[in-house]
Image (tube, rainbow, N blue to C red):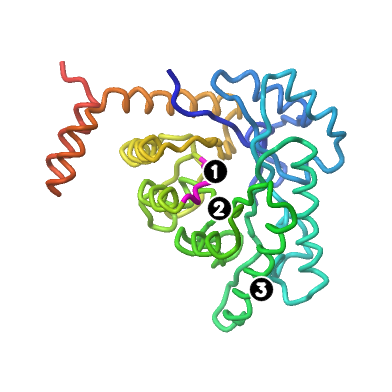
Amino acid sequence: MRKFKYAVGLWALGGASDRFLPEGYSDKTTTLKEDIETAGSVDGIDGVEIISSQAFDIDPADFKGWLTDNNLQLTSILANTFGDRKYKLGSITHTDTKIRNEAIDICKKTIDLALEMECPAVCLWPGSDGYDYSFQIDYVKHWNTLKESIIEIANYNKNIKICLEYKLKEPRKYMTIGAVGKALYLARECGENVGVVIDFGHSLMAKEKPAESAAVLSMNKKLFNVHMNDAYGDWDDDLIAVSVHLQESVEFMYYLEAMKYDGWIGLDIFPFRMDGKTAADLCIRNLRSIERILGRLDKAKLKKAMESLDAGNSQRVIRDALFTDR
């Protein structure tokens, strides 16, 4: 029996581009409807995430119909406060009140869209908010403005969850919400409906143990959403889940299970040189394999091993679940 429910970010399915080839590495051009149909055709995917700018001009009735036709749910909408040139120096932290208010209005419009689409959560990834050089910003003013903006957004409708997604860098050299501790601080300060989305690759980039970060967020009841992928740890590679970090992925899922996480696990991948459907299918297959590993894991024995603080003891238990000697 599957323990977790999986979604996919539709940006993963339509062909990705990078700064070296903005038109992308594939001739594939798809509509939002076609991306939803692709998501629905992947066994194990029951939900989708979208970027607000993908749906502002779509008839909500049409969109909900596409989801229903493909047995999918809309799990989260990402407020696009980063994809416009005017936000190059910041969005919800901008010192220009007009620009800042325009960014906040996008977030509020995204909340309205979520309500209309019967979506429970809005993701806030302040990709433009941060700095690139010393003395570029006034840290005190910047953080006060950030907190005030998030509180205003969260108070707009407290029935919608606001999920703060942290990331160390890119596109800014230092993004303001760069690590789990900063995200948790803001979530605790800004309201009951404000929590955190943990991205496995972002956590690795911040030199965290993703499992520990998930545990700390869960202990504070602030783990609102999960993005799964993999990375080498120095950049946001957005690779196929469980393609690089096997034990870290098992440990991460172990703690999601142990902390009784009942939210969605969204695939946040960018398969630049691979077919998106193939990449999503491989993610699901890998994650289901992790579920089977957790089913084999002697959890009582593992807890006892961890009490000893001897890594050799816990590694013996883990290898028995991972490998079958013949």
283, 99: nearer the viewer: 99
When the figure is inspected, residue 247 is found, relative to residue 212, above or below; the finding is above
In the image, taking residue 161 as reference, residue 253 lies left or right, namely left
Q: Distance of mark 2 from mark 3, alpha carbons?
A: 18 Å
**Rendered-image quadrant of the N terminus:** top left
Do the residues bearing badges 1 and 2 touch, measured as CB atoms within 8 Å?
A: yes
Q: Distance of mark 3 from mark 1, alpha carbons?
A: 25 Å
Q: Which amino acid is tagged 1?
A: Asn
Q: Which amino acid is tagged 3?
A: Thr
Task: Residue 8 in the image: state x and y as whole percent.
Answer: 60, 33
- At horizontal 42% and vertical 36% (from top left) the residue drawn is 260
In the image, taking residue 89 as reference, residue 116 lies left or right, namely right
Task: Residue 73 in the image: state x and y as whole percent.
Answer: 67, 28
**Rendered-image quadrant of the C terminus:** top left
Do the residues bearing badges 2 and 3 touch, measured as CB atoms within 8 Å?
A: no
Judged from the image, the secondary structure of the residue bearing numbered disc 1 is: strand
Do the residues bearing badges 3 and 1 touch, measured as CB atoms within 8 Å?
A: no
Q: Which amino acid is tagged 2?
A: Gly
Looking at the rendered image, the disc whose residue lies closer to the viewer, 1 or 2, is 2
Residue 208 lies in quadrant: bottom left
Give the label on residue 225, or none.
Answer: 1
In the image, taking residue 122 as reference, residue 204 lies left or right, namely left
Judged from the image, the secondary structure of the residue bearing numbered disc 2 is: strand
Of label 1 and label 2, which has the lower sequence position?
Answer: 2
SS assignment for the magenta stretch, majority:
strand
Which residue is identified by label 2? 195
